[in-house]
């Protein structure tokens, strides 16, 4: 940032945002997973997720069943990776991931193939997310931070 500032004149103004971008999330591309859903019942813990990039911690002995059911239901819309695949493909960046990230990764990572999203509703929730966009994907538009120089 300092180097960029040094390359500009004194009357130059810069605006740098802190977010990583959003993508449209049309209602017809949202999937809802209720607390009683079979997939939800296989999870060890509640998700700390984005609706377009989800980490799953699956109960012991159910990983193969979870993987098959998830791919059967959402394979057209989402990619599902094991933790080993995420690390091997360096989907979270080159090199070793931090201990915090490794702990959060759990057993699987699901990534949207487009504007699709999966919402895990809590018990008693009746409606889906009302926002027109979501973040959490790995597309370049979502990872780049806009900079405005005038």
Image: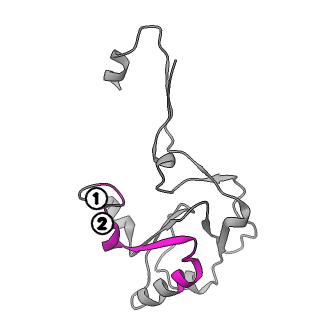
Q: CA distance from mark 2 to mark 1?
A: 8 Å
Q: In which quadrant of the rendered view does residue 100 lie?
A: bottom left
Q: How is the image coloured?
A: one colour
- Between 111 and 103, which is closer to the camera in this rendering? 111
Q: Is residue 95 left or right of residue 10?
A: left
The picture places residue 16, in percent across and down from the top left corner, at: 48, 30
| Label 2 vs 1, first from the N-terminus | 2
Q: Residue at x 46, y 48 (%)?
A: 140
Residue 70 in magenta stretch: yes
The secondary structure type at the circle numbered 1 is loop
The picture places residue 142, in percent across and down from the top left corner, at: 51, 48
The picture places residue 31, in percent across and down from the top left corner, at: 66, 71
Examine the rendered structure and indicate whether residue 40 appears above or below residue 103: below
* Mark 2 Cα shell of 10 Å, populated few (<14), some (14-19), many (≥20): some
Q: Is residue 21 left or right of residue 55?
A: right
Which numbered circle lies on residue 48? none
Q: Residue at x 38, y 72 (%)?
A: 106
* Mark 1 Cα shell of 10 Å, populated few (<14), some (14-19), many (≥20): some
Which numbered circle lies on residue 97? 1
Q: Which residue is mark 2?
A: 87
Examine the rendered structure and indicate whether residue 138 appears above or below residue 148: below
Contact between labelled residues 1 and 2, with CB atoms less than 8 Å apart: yes
The picture places residue 137, in percent across and down from the top left corner, at: 50, 57
Residue at the extreme left of the image, as rendered: 95
Q: Residue at x 28, y 59 (%)?
A: 97
Q: Is residue 114 left or right of residue 34?
A: left
The secondary structure type at the circle numbered 2 is helix
Question: What residue range appears in magenta?
Answer: 69-93
């Amino acid at each position: 940032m300092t180097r960029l500032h040094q390359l500009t004149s004194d009357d130059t103004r810069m605006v740098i945002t802190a977010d990583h971008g959003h993508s449209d999330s049309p209602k017809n591309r949202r999937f809802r997973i209720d607390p009683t859903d079979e997939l939800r019942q296989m999870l060890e813990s509640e998700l700390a997720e984005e609706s377009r990039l989800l980490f799953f911690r699956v109960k012991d002995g159910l990983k193969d069943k979870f993987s098959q059911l998830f791919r059967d239901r959402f394979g057209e819309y989402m990619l599902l990776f094991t933790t080993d695949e995420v690390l091997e493909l360096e989907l979270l960046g080159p090199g070793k991931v931090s201990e915090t990230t490794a702990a959060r990764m759990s057993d699987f990572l699901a990534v949207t193939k487009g504007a699709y999203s999966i919402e895990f509703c809590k018990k008693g929730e009746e409606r889906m997310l009302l926002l027109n966009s979501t973040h959490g994907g790995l597309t370049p538009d979502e990872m780049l931070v806009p900079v405005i120089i005038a």
